[in-house]
Amino acid sequence: MGEANRYVMLMSSLPHYGPLFAAMQLPISEIKLRRRLKLLAPEDQQKLAMIEDLLQWDHIDSGQTDAELIERAKHIVDGLDDGLLRQVVISRMEQRTFVAALRRRRHGASSPPEAETFGYGRWVKLICRNWHAPAFGLERAFPWLLDAEHCLSEDDAVGLERVLLQEVWTNLGRLSHGHYFDFAAVVMYVLRWNIIDRWTRYDSSEAKERFEELVTKTLAGHDSMFVGEASHG
């Protein structure tokens, strides 16, 4: 089967999803989705698995250090020959850096970590320079940062979840424009499916409990930037 026909057949078989927070159930079950993804060439299946393992909230190894996760992200980005997919991974890792820094600052860190690898992406130095500024001085470029900061100040785990999921959802929609029947379209469909799956299974009481657990770890000085952030996307 030709590569183009493979993607057309796959994407044509996947049902459309509506607005994120209006979803009451998945547009397609995981079993059916994974079965249809077998249409992908083996190398594309491997790339998709690596991206999902890196970006999905419940795939992060709690025994992995921040430095190890950052190096893993760099390795995956370097191995992607599609600039759009590199942008997808980078933007998600940068969001994780922002949220982890906000949470660390909210719970008492007077300055960013110096003795360890801190964050991922182009905004790390600016975050460090503007550690005490609201939204690190980046509210114009990233308006959602102020909303996330407010949710953290109110210990609002549900609100924070909505802010972060909506931002990822919107960004994937923007990046997917013009991509309908290629591998990038498949990846972004799957990542959006994962967001719907997370939201439809969302348990606000469990989220609150996890939120408080992370606060306790942070105050005790045992927090890891990205592993802690994983519970919020």
Image (cartoon, helix red, strand yellow):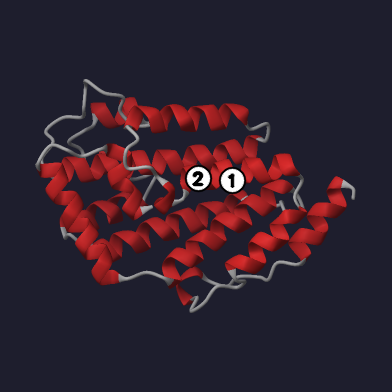
Q: Residues within 10 Å of mark 2 (few under 14, many from 20)?
A: some
Give x and y (percent) for residue 201: 41, 70
The residue that appears at 24% across and 26% down in the rendered structure is 129
Q: Is residue 68 above or below residue 135?
A: above
User: Is residue 18 toward the left or the right of residue 102 in the image?
Assistant: right
- Mark sitting on residue 49: 1
Amino acid on which the number 1 mark rests in the picture: Ala
The residue that appears at 42% across and 68% down in the rendered structure is 199
Can you name the residue that lies furthest to the right here? 1
In front: 162, or 30?
30
Give SS at disc 2.
helix
The residue that appears at 71% across and 52% down in the rendered structure is 178
In front: 203, or 135?
203
- Mark sitting on residue 127: none
The residue that appears at 39% across and 29% down in the rendered structure is 68
User: Is residue 25 toward the left or the right of residue 129 in the image?
Assistant: right
The residue at which mark 2 appears reads as: 53
Q: CA distance from mark 2 to mark 1?
A: 6 Å
Looking at the rendering, which quadrant does residue 14 occupy? bottom right
Give x and y (percent) for residue 217: 15, 45
Residue 180 visible within the image: no
